[in-house]
Image (spheres, rainbow, N blue to C red):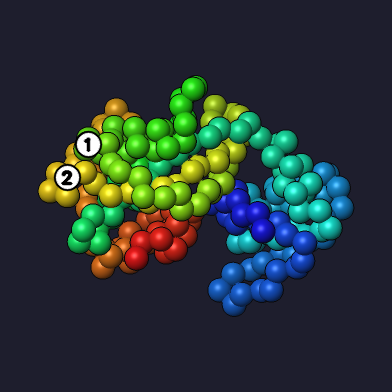
Amino acid sequence: MYKVFVNEKLLTISAEPELSKKENRILNIQYDSPDLLLFYLEQLKLNCYHHLHLFGENPKEIFHEFCKQYRLIEAAGGIVINAEGKALVIFRKGKWDLPKGKIDEGESSEEAAVREVAEECNIQPPQIIKLLTETWHTYTLNGQQILKKTYWYKMIPVDGNEEPSPQLAEDITEVKWADPVFFPEMKKNIYPAIDNLLNLYWK
């Protein structure tokens, strides 16, 4: 199944209809044409539904058609967890987030993830343990529709006692080692994609 957060609402694509969940309104649409895709994407952006699910015989083709509507940017970041089970989180532009950033030309996703975490949190470059997942989300930048693919890595700090500090130039105003008990407070003001990521991998 393909999963994309479109303006913080969920779009999924697969071969079969999605079963409805009580807490969410899911609109199941059998894919027919690109025009149909564009129409229902606009409905999703207008908050008519929390979850749009497109299904058809060829989910890869549907996703490819979706991607054609956007300019693709690739990024990388990390969930850095110390020996106490605390995760390194940042507060940027009014929301809790995880350190991440655009992959530079000639840079691997692993190199970008380590660099961005180190820069945004002012810590030594952390150690990558493994690739966790890839996420997709859309946003608008200077009137252009952007689709961002982000590679997420599980990491550990080189120095567990190091105190992070925010990279103010990137609009980050706070960095902290957050205990899992702080997660419910974060959920009040967090991007859905980051919320989902922490739910899955912050153990």
Q: Nearer the viewer, residue 74 or 138?
A: 74
Q: Nearer the viewer, residue 143 or 74?
A: 74
Circle 2 packing at 10 Å, graded few (<14), some (14-19), many (20+), is few
- From the top left corner, tell me how far across and down residue 19 is, in percent: 69, 73
Circle 1 packing at 10 Å, graded few (<14), some (14-19), many (20+), is some
Number of marks drawn: 2
Q: Is the residue under label 1 in contact with that under label 2 (CB below 8 Å)? A: yes
What element does badge 1 sit on?
loop
Q: On residue 159, which mark appears?
A: 2
- From the top left corner, tell me how far across and down residue 188 is, in percent: 37, 61
Q: Residue at x 70, y 56 (%)?
A: 13
Relative to 161, 156 lies left or right:
right
- From the top left corner, tell me how far across and down residue 108 is, in percent: 47, 31
Q: Nearer the viewer, residue 42 or 159?
A: 159
Q: Is residue 195 above or below residue 34?
A: below
Quadrant location of the C terminus in the rendered image: bottom left
Q: On residue 124, which mark appears?
A: 1
Relative to 39, 121 lies left or right:
left
Q: Residue furthest top?
A: 105
Quadrant location of the N terminus in the rendered image: bottom right
Q: Is residue 20 above or below residue 174?
A: below
Instruction: Tell me which label, 2 or 1, sits earlier in the chain.
Output: 1
Q: Is residue 17 above or below residue 48?
A: below
